[in-house]
Image: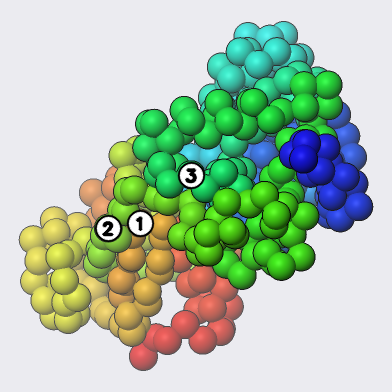
Amino acid sequence: MNISKALQRWYLKTHRSLPWRETTDPYLIWLSEIILQQTRVEQGTPYYYKFLEAFPTVLDLAQASENEVIKLWQGLGYYSRARNLHAAAKMVQDQFNGTFPFDYQNIRSLKGVGDYTAAAIASFAFGLPHAVVDGNVYRFLARYYGIKTPIDSGQGKKLFQELAGSILDKKNPGVHNQAIMEFGALHCKPAQPDCENCIFKLECNAFIAGQVHLLPVKGKKTKSRIRYFNYLIVKNKGAIFMKKRLSGDIWQHLYDFPLIETTSDLSAAKVMALKEWKTLFKKQSLHIELVSDQVVHKLSHQQIITRFFELRFEKSPDKEFFKQFTEIQLDDLHSYPVPRLIQRVFEERLEGYSLPIK
């Protein structure tokens, strides 16, 4: 069986109609690919439309502020994607005279664009013969050929890239790449693939050997890290204090509340006794109005266990406190990009909903 021809026949009958499949504009294809990294199509599609409305061209995106881009991205997570998206748009503006590059190497040179994304753009927009290898492709190839080499190993990545290239339809690479990814997404799924009705079941090594559930193989397992955040929501005359997070940790360049991180869950009295508390507030007198229950926020490799402390100064804060943070009026909060965890507080507490604060 010609694998590529079979995949393309299946694709032309079965594929989902998605807006970025109706264009060869490299900007629109690139935008969709970055949004859909680590994001489901259902979640990413509204963001695709929002970005197109705000930034119809790559130059519009390049000329936006980082805050505007990150704010629009809010809720998608993995914010380095948004920062890279913005940086790459500036590269197109400055290094390519505002024209999106049209060859693989120059596309690959853009910030945040790896082998997969460069191959996708090159094949979808320009019909260039570069094979894509994403999670769906790894899964299909591992099962079809019965490959047990870990997909996250150097050997595995090289093996699967070469294998994907060997079956690529070089005359029609765009449709081939769409087809193999779509087949993995809709049919050869991670759980409960429809093997009995699969067009490849007579050739699929994993199906024949009864090993579909064992493939693909992953070698590395990242242990989830548990962190304890004590967020201080400090109020002052209709405003609250926030700070822009720096590089080197989660949520870079987003805004959050004054934070004291601890190694375990502590009572309010113990948090107030910490040297970090005394450094923040010196001898100023504060009133604790509310302390939340634990709020658990899960990231890909971290679990953030949080308590929120709503505080109010009994007197105006001193100048040193103002220097550490940005004082934001409640009416202006919508213009600041914040992590989803903080957005929940705005939506559920500040607008009267039910974040479990007692």
Quadrant (top left, top right, bottom left, bottom right) of the C terminus: bottom left
- Mark 2 against mark 1, which lies toward the viewer? 2
Distance of label 2 from label 1 (alpha carbons) = 7 Å
User: What is the three-letter code of the residue carrying label 3?
Assistant: Ile
Expressed as whole percent of the image width and height from the top left, the position of residue 81 reads 54, 40
Q: Are marks 3 and 2 in contact (CB under 8 Å)?
A: no
Label 1, residues with CA under 10 Å away: few <14, some 14-19, many ≥20: few
Mark yes or no: residue 274 visible.
Answer: yes
Which residue is the site of mark 2? 223
Q: Residue at x 57, y 73 (%)?
A: 347
Mark 3 or mark 1, earlier in chain: 3
- As helix, strand or loop, the secondary structure at mark 2 comes to loop
- As helix, strand or loop, the secondary structure at mark 3 comes to loop
- As helix, strand or loop, the secondary structure at mark 1 comes to loop
Distance of label 3 from label 2 (alpha carbons) = 25 Å
Nearer the observer, 110 or 173: 173
> Does 298 appear above or below 168?
below
Nearer the observer, 335 or 213: 213
Nearer the observer, 37 or 345: 37
Which residue is the site of mark 3? 147
User: What is the three-letter code of the residue carrying label 2?
Assistant: Lys
Label 3, residues with CA under 10 Å away: few <14, some 14-19, many ≥20: many
> Does 325 appear above or below 331?
above
- Relative side of 280 to 105, left or right: left
Expressed as whole percent of the image width and height from the top left, the position of residue 142 reads 54, 46
- Relative side of 195 to 87, left or right: right
Q: Residue at x 46, y 60 (%)?
A: 214
